[in-house]
Amino acid sequence: MHIDIFEFRDPGAFLKLKYQALKEAEPGVSHRYISASLGFKSPAIFCQIINGRIEPSPKTLDGLARLFKLGGVERDFLAHLFILRKIKDNRIRTSVLAGFFSGHGIGERVFSNR
């Protein structure tokens, strides 16, 4: 199943779906496995990232990109999604997204609430 990160506006929703897809493909995958793969001892870290309690570092974003097989632009967009999570004004969010898409040569996207 292909999950297009550019259709998402919430990094947690994207990571949940990618996690579920990875778990279906590789049944041994768990939050503990993901957290350990990112270099954390606590299995709760991945869940806290998904739920917005922890902001991932650039190193953690690189680890997530590797685990979920994201390309460079997709990894950058994931980083932007975490930034957008902090912005409450929808006009600013839309402007930041439009700037990202035009700056990366990506055509107009329909903005959803995913």
Image: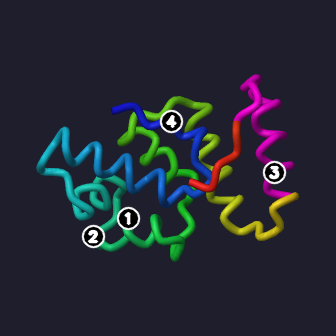
| Side (left or right) of 27 relative to 41 | left
Q: Name which of mark 3 and mark 4 comes first in the sequence.
A: 4
Q: Which residue is drawn at 81% across and 31% down?
A: 103
Q: Name which of mark 1 and mark 3 comes first in the sequence.
A: 1
Tell me the chief SS of the magenta region. Answer: helix
Q: How far apart are marks 2 and 3 (CA)?
A: 34 Å
Residue bearing the label numbered 1: 46
Q: How far apart are marks 2 and 1 (CA)?
A: 7 Å
Residue bearing the label numbered 3: 94
Residue 24 placed where, x, y %? 19, 44
Residue 68 placed where, x, y %? 38, 40
Q: Give the range drawn in magenta.
A: 92-109
Q: Which SS class for mark 2?
A: loop
Q: Which SS class for mark 1?
A: helix
Residue 44 placed where, x, y %? 32, 73
Residue 26 placed where, x, y %? 16, 42
Q: Distance between the residues labelled 1 and 3?
A: 27 Å
Residue bearing the label numbered 4: 4
- Mark 2 burial class by Cα count in 10 Å: few <14, some 14-19, many 20+: some
Q: How far apart are marks 1 and 4 (CA)?
A: 20 Å
Q: Name which of mark 4 and mark 2 comes first in the sequence.
A: 4
CB within 8 Å, label 1 to label 3: no
In the image, which is nearer the foreground, mark 1 or mark 4? 4
> Which amino acid does the dot numbered 1 rest on?
Phe
Residue bearing the label numbered 2: 43
CB within 8 Å, label 2 to label 1: yes
In the image, which is nearer the foreground, mark 1 or mark 3? 3
Q: How far apart are marks 4 and 2 (CA)?
A: 26 Å
Residue found at the far bottom of this picture: 53
